[in-house]
Amino acid sequence: MLNKYYEILGLSNDASVFEIKQAFRNRAKELHPDVNKNQNAHEQFILLLEAYEYLINQKKNTTKDKNFASSQRWQDNAAARAKHRAEYFSKINYKKFVNSDYFKTVTSLSTIFEHLGFFIGVGILIPVPVILIVLYGLSGVIISLFIMFITLPLIRQAIKSRSSINIEEFFRAVAFVTKTRDVSVLILSILNLFIVLKVGFQTLIPFTTLIWAFGLTMAFIFFFTRFELNKKARSSAVISFCYCPFILNLLLAINFLFSANPGWEIYSFTHQGNNAEGKLAYINLENNRYRDYSGIRIFADFNSMKDANKIAYKFEDGLLGFRVMKDYKFYKDSSIRP
């Protein structure tokens, strides 16, 4: 059965998940009854979808689960579900099938990687050599030939896949992927981290208070959604560790962006230490001012402050009542004022 499924997709037994998805995408477009005029089109399409789901199930599961995937039990359950889906998709028109979430979920990443491979391959073949030759002359030619030599498989694949390149399809795939939960979680996590670093640390809330506020709120939301609302563990985790921090960060951002009453404060400072590369410094202000607010006393631009002995902070009153640090300047001479 396993060899038969690989044969249906036109693949060898060592094909990767990416290759299985890519083969299914291409074969599904050929075998859908709406475009396949063979009298057995309906059965071919059902078998194709069954083969795809079987192989993906086997590739993605653990070694222990692979025995289950290969068992008669899989044939009685998962294969039946695959046939049911295939029955439905074989009856709808081709355009509706390729625009379905099922087909997009299967093919979007393959489409994106295929197009990115093409763009990179073409870039190595044309713009990169031109830029290197303009910048380095004869040396640029040698560098270009070396780069083209080591990336020859990528260039060959890009040329081979040029007929299937469709910019509109590429952007549709990107748009669909960005709306999926995993990608949304990733984007939201990055956004949360960015807001904490750029806004939370510049807000005059003690660092420990900020951590406790986030931690306790997320823990409460997790247990509430998990046990009171009977959400699945994964859904509760996404809500508590992504959406909940985003709401708190949104409040911090509103407080930061809509601030007023600017004023400057000037303090002498001493370096507490910097990292081995001299890129990051942590300072202590005179009279231990703002000792509980670590965010406004950590700086990455060490070179601009290494010879300075004073710092001027620009504070404003945030919309929600929390003061924020909007700007700062380092200088040496106490006679200088911002």
Image (spheres, rainbow, N blue to C red):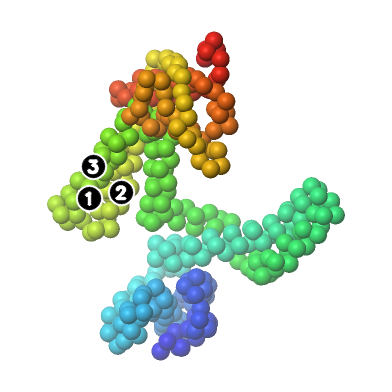
Asked if residue 242 is positioned above or below residue 123 in the image, the reply reads above
Instruction: Please tell me how crowded label 1 is: few (under 14), some (14-19), or many (20+) other residues with Cα within 10 Å.
Output: many
Instruction: Please tell me how crowded label 3 is: few (under 14), some (14-19), or many (20+) other residues with Cα within 10 Å.
Output: some
Label whose residue precedes the other's in the sequence (2 or 3): 3
Residue assigned mark 1? 222
Residue at the top extreme, as displayed: 335
Asked if residue 24 is positioned above or below residue 282 in the image, the reply reads below
Residue assigned mark 2? 241
Q: Amino acid at mark 1?
A: Phe
Query: x, y (%) of residue 155?
Result: 68, 66
User: Disc 1 to disc 3, how far (Cα)?
Assistant: 9 Å
Q: Amino acid at mark 2?
A: Phe
Q: Are marks 2 and 1 in contact (CB under 8 Å)?
A: yes
Residue at the right extreme, as displayed: 138
Query: x, y (%) of residue 125?
Result: 73, 60
Label whose residue precedes the other's in the sequence (2 or 1): 1
Indicate the quadrant where residue 294 lies. top left
Q: Residue at x 51, y 65 (%)?
A: 110
